[in-house]
Image: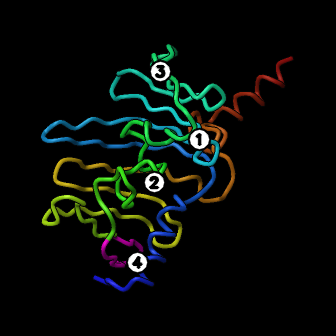
Amino acid sequence: MDTSSEQLAIAIGKALGGGQASAYTGTSYCQSGNHLVRHAVSVHPRAFIWSATELPEGPTRTFDPRRLIIQTDGVDDPYGLSIERIPFSFPEAVQLSFPLSLPIWGRQLDDYHPVACEVNGSDTTLLLRHRVDRTIFGSFTFDTESGIAKTLFTPTTALKLEREIPPENGKYDFGFVAGQGDPDLQNRLRSDENTH
């Protein structure tokens, strides 16, 4: 565990960057006590656009950045958000996608603040200390190179984000076009062409 101010500042800067600017999909896990909720998430971090659908068939919450409104199944929530409240009012399902929404940076209303960091393989973990009860700790883990958040653990909350891996060839994956679906489709289409 490294408690030097310099290494901690570097780690915090990397974590606050939040990783890649490109859009992605994935699954988030939110646990409070014995209650675990999974969400299918679709996020574009730099544009503050996101949607989160509770799995298996729960409600879908989205954020409209033009109107500053969170919607549930297409219906506006009764209150709008101000610029100052974004992303503090984002639900747990997308908080790891927006690291500033997490109450762990030592700001006035945050519950925790980073006190040390540790690099384990490709991940960096920030050790978090509770602001009021200094005997309570948590951890925030992110990918060291990219800054992509992975987990947040405190005594009361566990958040985990698993991003879907984009195609290895760097090209878009359009389902069957990229190799999924009917492998004989092209041969059948060609034989249909010869019958005209």
Q: Return the x and y of residue 27 as percentages of the image width and height.
A: 40, 42
Q: For the residue marked with disc 3, what is the amino acid?
A: Tyr
Q: Report the side of 89 relative to 196 (left or right).
A: left
Q: Mark 1 sits on what residue? A: 48
Residue 91 belongs to the span the image colors magenta: no
Are circles 2 and 1 on residues that touch, CB within 8 Å? no
The residue lying at 62 percent from left, 54 percent from top is 21
Could you tell which of marks 2 and 4 lies nearer the N-terminus?
Answer: 4
In this view, the residue farthest toward the top is 75
- 59 or 32: which is nearer to us? 32
The residue lying at 50 percent from left, 13 percent from top is 75
The quarter in which the C terminus is drawn is top right
Could you tell which of marks 3 and 4 lies nearer the N-terminus?
Answer: 4
Residue interval drawn in magenta: 115-125
Q: For the residue marked with disc 1, what is the amino acid?
A: Phe
- How many numbered badges does the structure rendering display? 4
- 185 or 102: which is nearer to us? 102
Q: For the residue marked with disc 2, what is the amino acid?
A: Pro
Q: Quadrant of residue 68?
A: top right
Q: Which mark is residue 8?
A: 4
Circle 3 — which element? loop
Q: Return the x and y of residue 109 as percentages of the image width and height.
A: 35, 50
- 67 or 170: which is nearer to us? 67
Circle 2 — which element? helix
Bin the neighbour count of mark 1 within 10 Å (Cα to Cα): few under 14, some 14-19, many 20 and up. some
**In front: mark 2 or mark 3?**
3
The residue lying at 53 percent from left, 36 percent from top is 50
Circle 1 — which element? loop
Bin the neighbour count of mark 2 within 10 Å (Cα to Cα): few under 14, some 14-19, many 20 and up. many
